[in-house]
Image: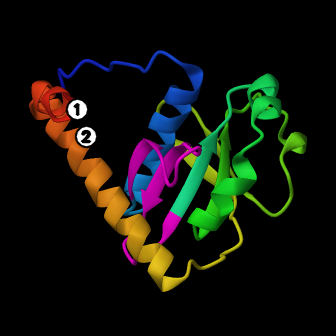
Amino acid sequence: MDQTPDILPQMPGQRLARGVARALRAMDFVSVEEFVPTPGLRVDVLALGPKGEIWVIECKSSRADYLADQKWTGYLEWCDRFFWAVDADFPTELLPDGSGLILADAYGAEIIRMSPDTPLAPARRKVMVQKFARHAASRLQGLRDPTALISAWV
């Protein structure tokens, strides 16, 4: 029997992101949270698929959280597919047509509506894959040696 404690993220959006990441992993995607594709933008989840697909998933925990987001259209040029991830109580009629929809909780997620495929230009894809790799490696290094990241900033 697995004795690993189930430590839940504190914030509702982080809980959604965890469930999304778990579901994406089952689809052979890997993901990172709080990814910055360009200064001024921060996506909740960036996923990299087995064929190099790049998906952006924005996690919205409430109507107010969604209405406060004014930057989401800026994410479209950084991905092949864009999704909203919300819980079962979220008023999905608020979400714009033409975007994907994922229902999620802290333990899993399901794609309800697939996003249209808008393939990235090869040069943009290369930049995103490199940024993804560096971001993921930096996170891993920070887990293994937190002081390494601090000393790099000093």
Q: In which quadrant will I find the N terminus?
A: top left
Q: In which quadrant will I find the C terminus?
A: top left
Position of residue 84 relative to residue 151, above or below, is: below
Most extreme residue toward the right is 93
The residue indicated by pointer 1 is 153
Q: Does the segment drawn in magenta span residue 2?
A: no
Lower position in the chain sequence, tag 2 or tag 1: 2
Q: In screen coordinates, is 58 left or right of 91?
A: left
Residue at point 45%, 35% (across, down): 18
Mark 1: amino acid: Trp
Residue 102 at x, y percent in the picture: 65, 48
Q: Tell me the quarter of the picture where residue 47 sits.
A: bottom left
Distance (Cα) linking label 2 and label 1: 14 Å
Residue 88 visible: yes
Residue at point 53%, 47% (across, down): 39
Question: Helix, strand or loop at disc 2?
Answer: helix
Mark seen at residue 115: none
Mark 2 near mark 1, Cβ–Cβ under 8 Å?
no
Residue 46 at x, y percent in the picture: 48, 53
Most extreme residue toward the bottom is 122
**Residue stretch rendered in magenta on the structure:** 30-54
Mark 2: amino acid: Arg
The residue indicated by pointer 2 is 139
